[in-house]
Image (tube, rainbow, N blue to C red):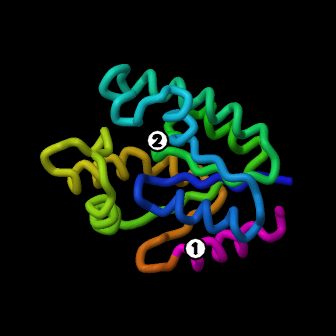
Amino acid sequence: MVNIVLTGFMCTGKTSVGMKLKEILNYDYYDTDELIQNKMGLTISEIFRIFGESYFRDIESKIVKEVSKNDKSIISTGGGVVLRKENMENLRKNGIIINLSAKPETIYERLKKQPGIRPLLDKPNPLQEIRKLLKQREKYYQDCDFQIQTDNISVEKVAYKILECIKDRL
């Protein structure tokens, strides 16, 4: 059995959709950011501040390598997991990679409703930073097996769209 891997920028619905898929399929669920925080005993923001992004990406790659060995799992990844080829190769070995996307404005509105600061958006103009990062990551997100837009659509509908896309591979 294969894993369902959810990639995408922050606030595109990876965690919510992942939890819904877990409920529907009765698969195990792993959130790579959560696993990193548990392993380090620090928040993502603290890891970035204390050790830097490169260190965080190294830990992220180790976690991805571990969880990608599982079967019948939903794996929700951090927004930048796609930046390293080794991550995508590991996730693809036993997984179908789904990219969840949303417009910059949607991401910004969702972000404002969540507590805490995201380290890459701790800038004077977060919406401009979102646009810049989305543009930089666009080619990486396109390397996924399927892309699903999450603007103005319920978590449940996104989950069922994913299942429709991958039904032949489950």
Q: Locate residue 130, reporting x and y percent.
A: 29, 52
The rendered magenta stretch, by its main secondary structure, is classed as helix
Disc 1 marks a residue whose amino acid type is: Val
Q: Quadrant of the C terminus?
A: bottom right
**SS assignment at label 2:** loop
The answer to whether residue 96 is seen in the rendering is: no
User: Which of these two is toward me, 159 or 136?
Assistant: 159
* Quadrant in which residue 161 is drawn: bottom right
The answer to whether residue 117 is seen in the rendering is: yes
Q: Locate residue 54, reporting x and y percent.
A: 42, 23
Q: Residue at x 63, y 62 (%)?
A: 146
The label shown at residue 158 is 1
Whether residue 165 is situated above or below residue 116 in the rendered picture: below
Q: Residue at x 50, y 44 (%)?
A: 78
Whether residue 44 is situated above or below residue 141 in the rendered picture: above
- Residue under label 2: 80
Q: Are marks 2 and 1 in contact (CB under 8 Å)?
A: no
User: Which of these two is toward me, 50 or 149?
Assistant: 50
Disc 2 marks a residue whose amino acid type is: Gly
Q: Locate residue 62, reporting x and y percent.
A: 62, 27
Distance between the alpha carbons at the discs numbered 2 and 1:
21 Å
Q: Residue at x 61, y 60 (%)?
A: 18
Q: Is residue 160 magenta?
A: yes
Q: Locate residue 136, reporting x and y percent.
A: 37, 45
Magenta part of the protein: which range?
A: 155-170
